[in-house]
Amino acid sequence: MVLYSLGMIDILRQFRFEATLRYYAEFFGSVAPMVFGRSLLMGFATTAACLLLGYPMSYYIAVKSGPRKETLMLLVIIPFWVSFLLRTYALMTILDVNGIINVTLLSLGLISEPLNLMYNMQAVLLGMVYNYLPFMILPLYASMEKLDQSLLEAAGSLGAGPARSFLHVTLPLTVSGIGAGSILVFVPAVGEFIIPQLLGGTESFMIGNLIWTLFLKARNLWFGSAVSIILIALVVLMVGLYMKYITKGEEMAI
Amino acid sequence: MKRRIGDRILKGYSIVLYLFLYAPILIMVVFSFNDSRLLAVWRGFSLRWYDTLLADPTVWKAFYNSIWVAGLTTVISMVFGTMVAFALIRYSFRGKSILDSSLYFPIVIPEITEALSLLLFYVFTGIPLGAMTVAIGHIAFSISYATIVIRSRLVGFDRSVEEAAKSLGANEFRTFFHVTLPLILPGVIAGGLLAFTVSYDDFVKTAFTAGPGFQTLPLRIYAMASRGGVSPLLNALATITLAVSMCLALVRLRLSKT
């Protein structure tokens, strides 16, 4: 494994040395920066949506007790067992022109023509949230389970309202879960390939699609490598910044 | 009273979210048994799409490819995973912490960069793309998944039984195969099953390293989904693929509870 991971870095480097910085210059003159911006935006949107949707659900599961809690958690984990490709395809069967939503709405007479639900940004975002939600719930749940309920009671008895005790007790104490969940969602979401490829159109072309096109269609290994090196650097930078911020938040909470 | 209403809202909300997670998969599975060419109009139960699939040699070929790549990945990941896990738990050596943290590489970096690094490696070394390059790629990344699972099993291992075996005259070899291995076997199998699942479900790495002519089930599904869009036939193929991963996951769950 070590040899392997080192090997991969060496090879990427060698390509870069041969190619000089020309391809990095090319990067800024192409559509790539826009695609990067869109992917980052998509990553943020997915993370935020998963967090907002997942937080109440994690809380709901965490305050349950005994076997019911385990069952509810298992129900979150089971979709993990189905691959991304299959889950994305499953979503296609619903959103398709002949899919269940359109057929139902048509037969109810609510619409006269099938809606175009696929091949746009919203569909990609829905696909992302659908696929990544369990990644957010797991760490959130783990951090909430450790939360001592008596702290909330203490806050309540000291006169804090629900909103106040949430902001000053629950939220700071689950910051580690929020951080872990956000990274688990953000990193793969930015580099996602299958979801935008199957559910998206030209307006939702992301880095993953760009790399795919460059490597497998255009066979431009050098420019492709430059793009992926920038992707890795960007992701590492983002995660680094985030970790720093989160650990600071944790220190403040303690 | 106020609290109860809050609880109800939370409960209703969670049920909706659970439905969101399951509905698409359930609908896909249900409509794979639909006796109609139409996607979402129920015309009665039928296995006709499954019959069509079973008569398609390209599907069989893809299934066969998936199974042997995943099988090979499993065996090699189990052997190497056990070795790496032992090395990490029992010995200290230079670079141990690097090895330890590099185990999490495949889990944290975006999969597309893994796929790329593999492709670049093959292009650079001039290895022609095909079945072998796919298998090597799967093995390289699955070993770390297997290692993580096996290691967690080794952490709680009671070494006094090994010492007992040795003091009764068993050599290192015998001790390992008759005492240590049987005890950690559930962990090794769980690690192997995870490696199998990761390989069997993999799309991105396979797509980058397969080259023309070699197809696994996920590649076949993707090719059909991106070309002709959704169809009951594809629902059936997806359902079969899903059933295999579900069974594997259930066995894994069982193993983790023993």
Image (tube, coloured by chain):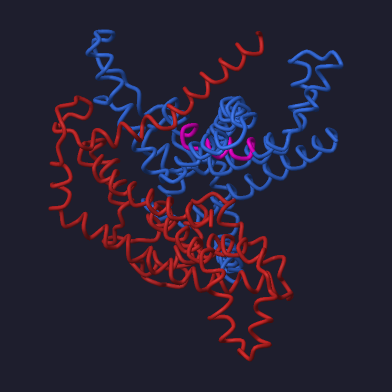
Chain colours: A blue, B red
Residue B71: image location, x then y, percent: 37, 66
Residue B144, placed above or below residue A247: below
Residue A51: image location, x then y, percent: 60, 29
Residue B226, placed above or below residue B207: above
Magenta-highlighted residues: A128-141
**Main secondary structure found in the magenta portion:** helix
Would you say B35 lies left or right of A96 here? left
The number of numbered badges drawn on the structure is 0
Residue at left offset 38%, top offset 37%: A88
Residue at left offset 28%, top offset 41%: B225
Q: Nearer the viewer, residue A73 or A213?
A: A73
Residue B148: image location, x then y, percent: 59, 61
Residue A187: image location, x then y, percent: 58, 43
Would you say A112 lies left or right of A199 here? left
Q: Nearer the viewer, residue B89 or B209?
A: B89
Residue at left offset 29%, top offset 58%: B215
Based on the displayed image, in which of its 4 quarters is residue A149 positioned?
Answer: top right
Q: Nearer the viewer, residue A116 or A83?
A: A83
- The N terminus of chain B appears in which quarter of the rendering? top right
Asked if the magenta segment contains residue A130, the reply would be: yes
Q: Nearer the viewer, residue A139 or A118?
A: A139
Asked if the magenta segment contains residue B247, the reply would be: no
